[in-house]
Amino acid sequence: MKNIDVLHHSIRSRSGLALNELLEQHPNIPRRTVQRLISELMTSGQVVATGKGRARRYFAIANSAIATPADSNHFPDYIPLSTDSRDILAYINQPLAARKPVGYQQDFLAAYEPNHSYYLSQSLRLQLHKMGRTTQHQAPAGTYSRAILNRLLIDLSWASSHLEGNTYSRLDTVELIEQGKVAQGKAVLETQMILNHKAAIELLVENSESAGFNHYTLMNLHSALAENLLPNPADEGRIRMHAVDISKSVYRPLSTPQQIQTALDMLLAKSNAIQDPFEQSFFMMVHLPYLQPFADINKRTSRLTANLPLFRANLCPLTFLDVPEQAYSCATLGVYELTRVELLRDLYVWAYERSTQEYLAIKQGLAEPDPARLIWRELIKTTIKDVVTHPEADAMTTISDAVARQVPDAERANVQALIIEELRRLHEGVLARYGLRPSEFKVWEQAQRE
């Protein structure tokens, strides 16, 4: 038997072997020859390596486990991947029985030092900033995301839901969000998922200036995404109280609430200290699903949380448009089972470029925000809510009284005109912006008609 076949057989017979273990098994084969033969096995796709340095181990890939375009786990060829990413993909594409069961690795998070450790290299961060820069980059936090809110609600709600297997089309999503029209033949769960995304995105956008990586923001974001979707409603916006299994994975997350809480405290502290918005965004994409702090809906929460730094910096959002469900799943499994981020990183960069391409026309054609609307946005929101929730009162009197109490004489006419304009454009798709319920809006509409 040739030396290369001997080594291949040794690697196949174990769940993974380090170089030193191979040398011990075959002392008659020189070290350099072993290294060369392993390299040939990797090049031919028969062996994949995981880890670095002394932790590097080699795994054999069965022919049946190598992905082909017909396989459900096929990673699209049009998404550029590094060699490291291909190693991760080859490992993940093995059958479950060939992958080593692993638990939560505390050192993965503990070893990360904000602003010293980087998952995204400096050149990648510069590239992302160049792609995502908008004309509002120096405006108050959240200015750009508010300006594109209507488009953002549709794109991000649809794409993120699609990654969870939701079958709503983009047109279905438009009609649901803008007109409140439920698509025919869709499960109630799918409709609820879209509406929950809408509410959660509005929550983040409207609170961009004050929202941070803290328990309050995270728990309320999860609660919005999880509303009416969990078997136990008490799990909405609450730390997981029980063990969970990850479908199609050998990864087992932490199981006790105390451990989860301690890890979450560290995760939030480190994320808050990260200065670059893209590194902060990607850090949350990596570590929030890995921790699995909630009973369910962890990945959805991470996708929206990853947008918060981009909203605050007035960068283009990450909408996940055109991201294949299986590609996202494989990239996430790479983090779960190997604590390696390269595959998810390559997908993140490709997905962000796709998002910015979609928003390029918006970026170029977007009008500058109305300064008065920005300054008086809280007054506008509270006044419209007051008008709608008191349909028996005269709307013009309510508006003029509110403006007279808070706005200087020279600006009153302009602010009053802005409020009236917003009131005329009011529809079901923007009610959450004003803290209104559809039932309140319908009562007010009926009163106007009468």
Image (cartoon, grey):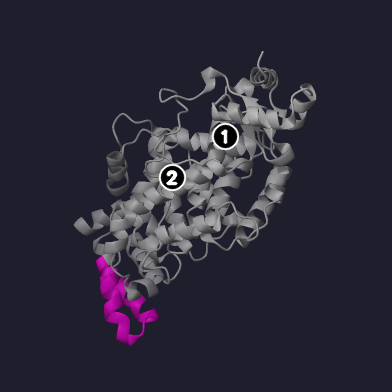
* Residue at the disc numbered 2: 196
Q: Main secondary structure of the magenta part?
A: helix
Task: For label 1, count other residues whose C-alpha is less than 10 Å away and answer few (under 14), some (14-19) or many (20+).
Answer: many
The spot of residue 411 in percent (x, y) is 31, 82
Could you say which quadrant of the image residue 410 lies in? bottom left
Question: What count of labels does the image hold?
Answer: 2
In this rendered view, identify the residue nearer to me: 88 or 389.
88
Q: Quarter of the image containing the N terminus?
A: top right
Q: Quarter of the image containing the C terminus?
A: bottom left
Could you say which quadrant of the image residue 22 lies in? top right
Amino acid type, label 1? Asp
Task: For label 2, count other residues whose C-alpha is less than 10 Å away and answer few (under 14), some (14-19) or many (20+).
Answer: many
Span colored in magenta: 395-421
User: Is 252 located above or below residue 378 in the figure?
Assistant: above
The spot of residue 226 in percent (x, y) is 50, 42
Foreground mark, 2 or 1, reads 1
Whether residue 209 can be seen here: yes
The spot of residue 283 in percent (x, y) is 58, 51
In this rendered view, identify the residue nearer to me: 275 or 91.
91
Residue at the location (45% across, 25% down)?
72
The spot of residue 329 in percent (x, y) is 50, 35
* Residue at the disc numbered 1: 87
Whether residue 229 can be seen here: no
Secondary structure of the residue carrying tag 2 is: helix
In this rendered view, identify the residue nearer to me: 254 or 58.
58
Secondary structure of the residue carrying tag 1 is: helix
Residue at the location (52% across, 34% down)?
330
- Report the side of 435 relative to 271 (left or right): left
In this rendered view, identify the residue nearer to me: 17 or 150.
17
Could you say which quadrant of the image residue 293 lies in? top right
Residue at the location (64% across, 28% down)?
38
View extreme (bottom): residue:
410
